Amino acid sequence: MKLYLRLLWLFLTYRWNPACLALGPCRTSFRVLPTDLDLLGHVNNGVYLTLMDVARMDLLLRSGLVSQLKPQGWYPVIVGSSMRFRRSLKLWQSFDIHTEVIGWDKKCIFLAQRFIRADEVVAEGVVVSRFLGPDRYKVPTADLLAAIGYTGSDPELPRWVTDWYQAQQVSSNEWK
């Protein structure tokens, strides 16, 4: 339920926040609510991923990507994620999530999301996303970039990201 309330608030307020570029960065502000906490009094690790969903939606809305991709019926799905926690977030603390695209391959987009409180990174995550279309058609990254008018160069993914993603692929194949 808390995800839906945060998304509703985002849909009602995103127009009053500054626009951002399609590849980011995009800064989304939050405050820790009582429903975000676990029994130890800090934000539950699963809540971080939920908040990252809201921040990615903020990027899609404020960059105009939702309106650009909706006519094709394209939408993002998450195919992998990794989190690192450095510090706790406690009740009522305010923080921002900085979201940006750090690269892509032929199939997927890689995003970095950092939780920042008082200029300190308290958690960080990497998310792998791909776009699907009608009938779950897998949209090639080149088609996605063309649709949004991106003409820049392809950024090189950090080696640790490619190593992590390859390890995920091996693991996924072993579980089949």
Image: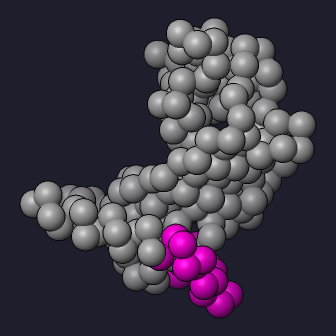
Residues rendered magenta in the picture: 144-162
Q: Is residue 63 above or below residue 110?
A: above
Residue 175 falls left or right of residue 158: left
Q: Is residue 18 above or below residue 24?
A: above
State the residue in front, 40 or 94: 40
Q: Position of residue 176 (x, y in %)?
A: 10, 60
Could you tell me how many numbered marks the image carries?
0
Q: Position of residue 118 (x, y in %)?
A: 89, 37
Which picture quadrant has residue 88?
A: top right
Q: Position of residue 87 (x, y in %)?
A: 71, 35
Residue at x 24% of width, y 63% of height: 171
Residue 22 falls left or right of residue 127: right
Residue 136 falls left or right of residue 65: left
Which picture quadrant has residue 43?
A: top right
Residue 64 in sight in this render: no
Q: Is residue 120 above or below residue 74?
A: above
Q: Position of residue 8 (x, y in %)?
A: 59, 25
Residue 100 in sight in this render: yes
Residue 156 included in the magenta stretch of the image: yes
Image colouring: one colour
